[in-house]
Amino acid sequence: MIGRNDPCPCGSGKKYKKCCQSKVAVSVETVQMEELERVLQSFYDEYPERKDIPEYINLANEWKSSLLKYLPEEMIEAIVLDEFFFHHRTDIYHGYLEKQKKKLMRPSVLQVVDTWQHPRAFIGEVKDVDDAYITVQMIFTDEVIRLRREGEKPVPEGVHLYCFILPDGTGNENHYLAVSSLIFFPTDHTSIIKEFAKRYTSQESVSDFIKENSLEFWRILGEAGYAGGEFTNFESGVLLSAMEFLQKHDREPNKLLDVIEDFLVEQQPNARKEVAIAAGAIRFGQEHSFFEPISMTLKEIAEWFEVSPSSMNKYYKELCAYYSDKVLV
């Protein structure tokens, strides 16, 4: 065994603790996280089993009867799947964990799986975001958790989210991962979520309250206009305006729309008109070769969107600055 103060075996001449020890630690941690991810993924690959599918379908149909007029069918089915496993048929999940524990050999993984007995639903407001974690406060209590980010897409502060959580395996207090679906709600729906939170009283546990009121939570969101999208009505208007322009001129919109989405979420531009940002985005996209050039002057682009050239140029410049920073990063 290599001591921390021994010469590093890589031949660098440095002590092991100053050289490759950290790399080994990172490698072990990475392997552990990958194994834990496989444990979760294989659960959803294998379950529900054929004998349990009718019960799941009945629950899904119950939810669809209330929510199908608001939410996409696929989204309802995904939400209900977690409800089925973690609120209705916890025996299926617990049985799976016991089988996995007999197969798993790595002690550190077994130790984490032992903390995974009780996934719990979490509805919270995003308070802070860094490269690896989202800081989220529960809407019913003062509980604050660090939720592991699942990708590089920007997450704005102030939005709310919904998911089932488990300890993330790092051993750090209040550090969690989302079990399956991690759903963000645009700020358009903040007020209705806060109103829902007022229904909770400290006389019952948060977990019991969410279990008993989960369908009602999604129903009141639907009644308030939530349709499963990640963007506010304003942000959706910007994206739709830019997409309509590009499709009208037979240009592929997706590459530019990806940048606009991130810009809207991260920068939260304060524009009076959606089309002003869309016009600026078209000029930005054309000058940065996001699509084949369109034979229109800048004045004609502004007129197409019925905005002034100065308004278009304002958001063109903001997008240029944002994109320049992103590329440098």
Image: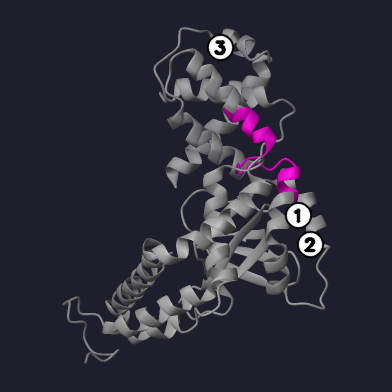
Q: How many residues crowd mark 2 within 10 Å: few (<14), some (14–19), many (20+)? A: some
Q: Which residue is mark 1?
A: 193
The reply to whether residue 143 is in sight is no
Which mark is nearer the camera, 3 or 1?
1
Dots 2, 3 in contact, CB < 8 A: no
| Label 1 element class | helix
Q: CA distance from mark 3 to mark 1?
A: 42 Å
First-in-chain label (2 vs 3) = 2
Residue 205 shown left or right of residue 117 in the figure? right
Dots 1, 2 in contact, CB < 8 A: yes
Q: Which residues are magenta?
A: 220-239
Q: Which residue is mark 2?
A: 197
Residue 167 is situated, as x and y percent measured from the top left of the image, at: 52, 75
User: Which residue occupies 62% across, 28% down?
Assistant: 238
Disc 1 residue type?
Ile
Q: How many residues crowd mark 3 within 10 Å: few (<14), some (14–19), many (20+)? A: some
User: Which residue occupies 58% across, 7% down?
Assistant: 300
Q: Quadrant of residue 22?
A: bottom left
Disc 3 residue type?
Leu
Q: How many residues crowd mark 1 within 10 Å: few (<14), some (14–19), many (20+)? A: many
User: Which residue occupies 64% across, 35% down?
Assistant: 235
First-in-chain label (3 vs 1) = 1
Residue 216 is situated, as x and y percent measured from the top left of the image, at: 73, 56
Considering the image in quadrants, where does the N terminus appear?
Answer: bottom left
Q: Which residue is mark 3?
A: 298
Q: CA distance from mark 2 to mark 3?
A: 48 Å
